[in-house]
Amino acid sequence: MSTRIPTDDLIARLAAAPAPARLAPGLTVGAMVLALGLGMALCWGLIGLRPDLAAALRVPMVWAKSALPLLLAVPALWLALRAARPGARLVLWPLAVPPILAAGLFADALMTLPAPQVLPTLRGQTALGCLTLVTALSLAPIVAGVALLSRGASTRPVLSGALIGLASGAAGAAAYALHCSEDSPLFFVTWYGAAILIATSLGAAAGARFLRW
């Protein structure tokens, strides 16, 4: 024989139960920005900004190194927050715009640079440092973003994590660009792009592990 719980008692029990965790978009963005900011401050404190930054920013190609990753980071973060909500519709095509612009800059540089200079310019002098530092800058925001997205209810955990990684890697590239003095698109499109792909993969792996429910 089942025991019926009076309605008033049931309401009281439900009210006393702890509320489920909710995704706070502002908190997620704030935590990721804070994590990235601390990483940037540490990075710039250790390796510094490029000495000629003020003058260099007058050159469109120099500020494009930061602007293009930022144009990727902002929609990626917005989409990551939407992906954490079940049933939310995702429009992914804006993520293609910065890579298309970057590919155009790469193609233009490839066609205008003398052939003997192409490979040396692409390899540059700091490719390993670029990959290492951009990836390192992305780690704390990935951790913060995935931890806070786990308070949501994403039905697409791998995609959610990948978008967090994409946003973190792109933001890290934008920050590193203020130190980097290699301004050819052959260099920064290749190596910033590779670092962003690494960060995206790390985010996807973290999402698969920690955002399933």
Image (cartoon, helix red, strand yellow):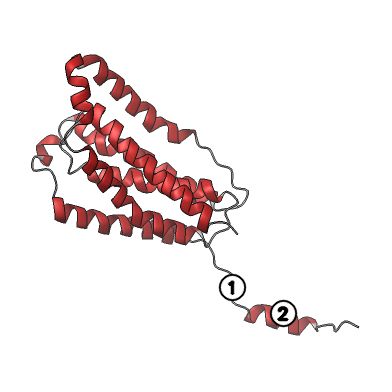
Q: Which residue is mark 1?
A: 19
Check the image and report above or below for 14 versus 184: below
Check the image and report above or below for 113 versus 204: above
Residue at 48% from the left image edge and 45% from the top image edge: 79
**The N terminus: image quadrant:** bottom right
The label shown at residue 11 is 2
| Furthest-right residue in this view | 1
Check the image and report above or below for 27 versus 178: below
Q: State the image coordinates of residue 49 (x, y, percent, origin top left).
A: 14, 47
Q: What secondary structure is found at the residue carrying circle 2?
A: helix
Depth order, front residue of 208/6: 208
**Which amino acid does the dot numbered 2 rest on?**
Ile
**Which amino acid does the dot numbered 1 rest on?**
Ala
Q: Are marks 2 and 1 in contact (CB under 8 Å)?
A: no
Q: CA distance from mark 2 to mark 1?
A: 14 Å
Residue at 24% from the left image edge and 20% from the top image edge: 109
Depth order, front residue of 213/126: 126
Q: State the image coordinates of residue 86 (x, y, percent, origin top left).
A: 61, 52
